[in-house]
């Protein structure tokens, strides 16, 4: 028997969004973990708001919505608000009832900057890694570090001379010009830098993101965004590993690729109590000489060196997920502070995707 077609359903519904979400949906475990971490941050979140005045967007819902944006690669906060308006799964995850109005995109952005200035993302990451279910999964002795380029939200035409000179075509005709970061800057995002990833590749306006991964399960434990330049990877590595070494209270190891194989970087790591398991760079130079590696048999003869080199490749999974599924490939934010906050959100989202599977295993 053919069913009768009704163009609209009933005016009222008595089924909650909780009942609409399948019992085995992956977001259930993630939501439970996020709520648990946020419950321990109540005091930190309360310090960001005045005790009187009009109620603001709840920071718990704000952070949950930002995580949703990364989980599903939603390209803008305006589109996030649009999808929150009609997607019951998103409303359930954030904690909105079907009748609750969504926030104005501009208001949402201003409140997001409040969390960013209050260092909430870093505190959330720290509490997540110290969660009773998560901490046993982490290694406190063996780590890997790598960096990746994050394309800036700025065009090549915006990269203009700092002294105000140049053509009158608004920067459209820059072919054949010698442009350098010390003489030029982007008018739309001054913090971005023109950087070439490798010989023969095009130079792009970008930032450089750096991540520290623990080697036991491949979870991100620290992140940092810097200006893109030739020494940024090594300097960021030293800063992050020094903090890891201090937290561990003993010597640690760090797996890195051959871009980190320089004498000063290897010496700096050893000086702060880090054993540098760096890939040897013995490439042949343009003059035909074989490059001398700063890593010798004092390091490579140990079995741990080979293990670190094997696990080191897993850090690429963090960047690959962030660029394929998250919002890491081309940032929609301007300024190194906002880009760093979004980068850290991608690292948190990557951990949240993987942790429930590890806990259940």
Image: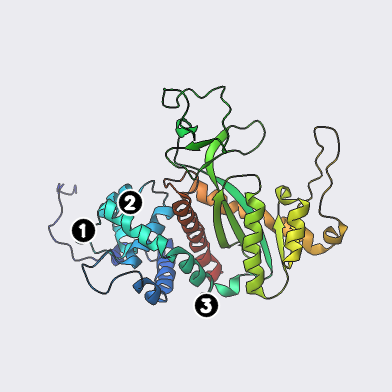
Which badge, 3 or 1, is on the more N-terminal residue?
1
Judge by depth and name the residue closer to the eye, 334 or 103: 334
Q: Which mark is residue 12?
A: none
Judge by depth and name the residue closer to the eye, 31 or 26: 31
Secondary structure category for the residue under label 3: loop
Judge by depth and name the residue closer to the eye, 68 or 330: 330
Q: Which residue position is annotated with label 2?
A: 80
Q: Residues within 10 Å of mark 1 (few under 14, many from 20)?
A: few
Residue 278 in sight in this render:
no
Question: In this picture, is 251 found above or below 293?
Answer: below
Rendered residue at 65%/66% (across/down): 242
- Which image quarter holds the C terminus? bottom right
Q: Are marks 2 and 3 in contact (CB under 8 Å)?
A: no
Rendered residue at 28%/49% (across/down): 82
Judge by depth and name the residue closer to the eye, 339 or 353: 339
Between the residue at mark 3 and the residue at mark 1, the CA separation in whole angstroms equals 35 Å
Rendered residue at 42%/22% (across/down): 169
Q: Quadrant of residue 16?
A: bottom left
Between the residue at mark 2 and the residue at mark 3, the CA separation in whole angstroms equals 32 Å
* Left or right of residue 297: residue 313: left
Q: Which residue position is annotated with label 1?
A: 101
Q: Residues within 10 Å of mark 2 (few under 14, many from 20)?
A: many
Which badge, 2 or 3, is on the more N-terminal residue?
2
Q: Which residue position is annotated with label 3?
A: 132
Which badge, 2 or 1, is on the more N-terminal residue?
2
Q: Residues within 10 Å of mark 3 (few under 14, many from 20)?
A: few
**Residue at far left of view:** 11
Rendered residue at 68%/76% (across/down): 249
Secondary structure category for the residue under label 1: loop
Counting from the top left corner in percent of width and height, residue 360 is at 53, 70
Secondary structure category for the residue under label 2: helix
Counting from the top left corner in percent of width and height, residue 107 is at 27, 55
């Amino acid at each position: 028997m053919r069913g009768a077609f009704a163009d609209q359903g009933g005016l009222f519904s008595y089924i909650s969004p909780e009942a609409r979400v399948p019992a085995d949906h992956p977001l259930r475990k993630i939501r439970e973990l996020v709520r648990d971490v946020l419950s321990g941050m109540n005091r930190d979140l309360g310090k960001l708001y005045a005790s009187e005045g009009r109620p603001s967007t709840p920071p718990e819902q704000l952070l949950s919505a930002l995580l949703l944006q990364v989980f599903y690669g939603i390209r803008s906060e305006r589109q996030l608000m649009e999808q929150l308006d009609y997607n019951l799964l998103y409303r359930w995850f954030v904690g909105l009832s079907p009748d609750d109005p969504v926030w104005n995109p501009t208001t949402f952005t201003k409140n997001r900057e409040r969390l960013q200035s209050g260092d909430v993302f870093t505190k959330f990451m720290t509490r997540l890694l110290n969660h009773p279910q998560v901490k046993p999964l982490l290694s406190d002795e063996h780590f890997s570090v790598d960096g990746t380029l994050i394309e800036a939200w700025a065009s090549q035409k915006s990269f203009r001379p700092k002294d105000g000179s140049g053509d009158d075509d608004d920067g459209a005709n820059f072919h054949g010009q010698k442009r350098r970061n010390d003489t030029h800057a982007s008018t739309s995002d001054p913090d971005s830098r023109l950087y070439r990833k490798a010989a023969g590749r095009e130079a792009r306006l970008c930032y450089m993101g750096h991540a520290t991964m623990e080697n036991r399960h491949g979870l991100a434990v620290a992140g940092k965004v810097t200006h893109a330049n030739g020494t940024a990877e090594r300097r960021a590595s030293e800063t992050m590993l020094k903090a890891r070494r201090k937290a561990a209270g003993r010597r640690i190891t760090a797996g890195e690729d051959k871009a980190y194989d320089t004498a000063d970087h290897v010496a700096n790591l050893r000086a702060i109590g880090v054993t540098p398991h760096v890939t040897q760079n013995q490439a042949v130079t343009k003059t035909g000489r074989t490059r001398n590696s700063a890593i010798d048999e004092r390091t490579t003869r140990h079995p741990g060196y080979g293990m670190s080199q094997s696990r080191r490749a897993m850090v690429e999974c963090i960047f690959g997920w962030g660029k394929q599924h998250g919002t890491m490939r081309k940032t929609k934010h301007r300024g190194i502070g906002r880009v760093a906050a979004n980068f850290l959100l991608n690292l948190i989202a990557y951990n949240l995707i993987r942790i429930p599977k590890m806990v259940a295993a």
